[in-house]
Image (spheres, rainbow, N blue to C red):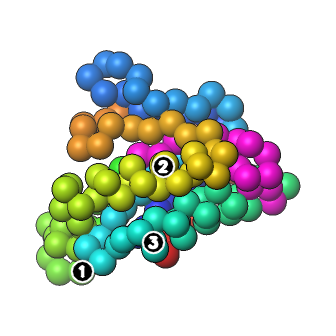
């Protein structure tokens, strides 16, 4: 499981002209990708990392500040460009495997007390964000 985590002052996801998820205060925008070998163990590890990662200002985390997270599924994080010019998606999990795992990460974050908004799995999404820093990390478990 892999995530691009960006510290933001605000972020939103729009699908077909409707905002489906947003955070309107400093927090984290999380683009989350799933690969074939991911399962329940990776879900727990990723949720813990996302909640506790000290990526906010003053080395704080969402766990210590209550800052929100906006989680957006992103299968392209497992795109490979090693050969040729066209990305290969063979490392990305199929939707029927990925969607329940993305949902499980969100559920685990909420069980930990995190405030979480989401995008819409499989939809064409317009993601807007204001990067704070800029501060962006690659998180893998």
Q: Position of residue 104 (x, y in %)?
A: 42, 54
Residue carrying label 3: 42
In the image, residue 30 sits, relative to residue 78, either above or below, namely above
- Among numbered discs 3 and 2, the one appearing first in the sequence: 3
Q: Secondary structure at mark 3?
A: helix
Judge whether residue 19 can be spotted in this image. Answer: yes
Per the rendered image, the range of residues in magenta is: 59-72
| Pointers 2 and 1 in contact (C-beta within 8 Å) | no
Q: Secondary structure at mark 1?
A: loop
Q: Position of residue 51 (x, y in %)?
A: 64, 56
Q: Position of residue 33 (x, y in %)?
A: 36, 61
Disc 2 crowd, CA 10 A, few/some/many (<14, 14-19, 20+) = many
Residue carrying label 2: 106
Mark 1 to mark 3: distance in Å? 25 Å
Verify whether residue 68 appears in magenta.
Answer: yes
Left or right relative to 92: residue 104: right
Please tell me the numbered disc located at residue 82: 1
In the image, residue 62 sits, relative to residue 88, either above or below, namely above
Judge whether residue 27 can be spotted in this image. Answer: no
Disc 3 crowd, CA 10 A, few/some/many (<14, 14-19, 20+) = some
Mark 3 to mark 2: distance in Å? 13 Å
């Amino acid at each position: 499981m892999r995530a691009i985590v960006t510290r933001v002052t605000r972020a939103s996801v729009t699908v077909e002209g409707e905002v489906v998820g947003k955070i309107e205060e400093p927090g984290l925008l999380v683009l989350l990708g799933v690969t074939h070998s991911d399962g329940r163990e990776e879900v727990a590890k990723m949720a813990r990392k996302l909640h506790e990662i000290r990526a906010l200002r003053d080395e704080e985390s969402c766990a210590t500040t209550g800052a929100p997270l906006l989680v957006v599924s992103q299968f392209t994080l497992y795109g490979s460009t090693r050969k040729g010019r066209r990305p290969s998606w063979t490392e990305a999990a199929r939707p029927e495997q990925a969607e329940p795992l993305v949902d499980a990460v969100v559920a685990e974050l909420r069980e930990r007390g995190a405030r979480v908004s989401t995008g819409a799995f499989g939809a064409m999404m317009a993601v807007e964000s204001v990067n704070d820093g800029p501060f962006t990390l690659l998180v893998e478990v």
